[in-house]
Image: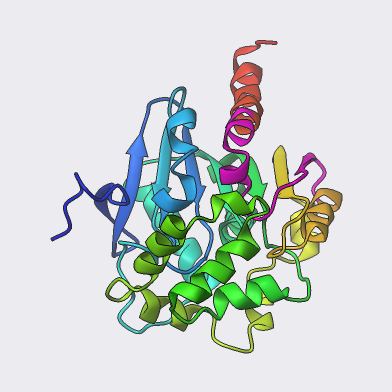
Amino acid sequence: MTDSSTTPELGREIVAAGYHTNVHDLGQGFPVLLIHGSGPGVTAWANWRLVMPELAKTRRVIAPDMLGFGYSERPADGEYSRQRWLDHALGVMDTLALDQVDLVGNSFGGGLALALAIAHPERVRRLVLMGSVGVRFPITSGLEAAWGYEPSLQAMRRLLDVFAFDRSLVTDELAELRYQASVRPGFHESFAAMFPPPRQRWVDNLASEEQDIQRLPHETLIIHGREDEVIPLRASQRLAELIDRAQLHVFGRCGHWTQIEHAGRFARLVNDFLDEAGNAATGGA
């Protein structure tokens, strides 16, 4: 058994939508659900480790490893789809008795967050989409490389160079850690089953219909790195055009790792945006 005291990726185990699920649950207050991206070896902790402590100062933070990722269960049939991930996210909310959450989705997780808000608008108070899929676009070489990753230290190093604008973040130690994470037992087998070629279909599968996006009633914060080589900035610009109550923030000198490359700014921006909902509810300024 993995020791959670020495493995920070481990939170606590719940059963969500029938699957054993690793979830980080910290802080108190109105809940915010964080849905991670889809890079090889990703976990909720790897994605959100710099952001969770800041958000948890004033709110309850829920960050699960999504179905098939990290330390959550892999479905026995090896089948993955947007609907299955959506059901899993709703299962996390239901198991934790969360009637409504603020919802933050990163990249792949943004597509799931968008779909959840469309299908169940009453379950979402405010929506944050970061470097998000959710509209159709021609797959980028960066996303093709991420979804088509074959484990090796060299391949991981090349991939991290694509993810980060600030190459000083891509150290040998980080590359080794992420590579080792990607080859833990069961990790790559599960990942390889998620986005087999041709991969354009998975971009399209994670996209919502534009008329459904236009009907979203939620206040929505959209965040993107200007130099993102994985998800094109145009995807977030299109989301901002479609969502009536949207605001778009673009970080310059930033790749696909907004929450890591600009962690402090990202946390302040999200906290301020979510605080507005609380102020409105209490009649505050």
Q: Quadrant of the C terminus?
A: top right
- Furthest-top residue in view? 284
The residue shown at (34%, 44%) is: 24
Q: Quadrant of the N terminus?
A: bottom left
The residue shown at (30%, 61%) is: 71
Where residue 102 appears, as percent x and y from the top left, is 55, 38
Taking depth in this image into account, of 1 and 92 the one nearest to the observer is 1
Where residue 256 appears, as percent x and y from the top left, is 65, 55
Which scheme is used to colour this image of the protein? rainbow
Taking depth in this image into account, of 62 and 269 the one nearest to the observer is 269
Taking depth in this image into account, of 118 and 272 the one nearest to the observer is 272
Where residue 49 appears, as percent x and y from the top left, is 43, 43
User: Along the horizontal axis of the image, is 198 left or right of 246?
Assistant: left
In the rendered view, tell whether residue 282 sits above or below residue 248: above
Residue 137 forms part of the magenta stretch: no
In the rendered view, tell whether residue 190 sits above or below residue 268: below
In the rendered view, tell whether residue 126 sits above or below residue 42: above
The residue shown at (70%, 76%) is: 141
Taking depth in this image into account, of 218 and 41 the one nearest to the observer is 41
Q: Residue 177: which quarter of the image?
A: bottom left
Residue 247 forms part of the magenta stretch: yes
Q: What are the residue bounds of the magenta stretch?
A: 243-268
User: Along the horizontal axis of the image, is 161 left or right of 90?
Assistant: right
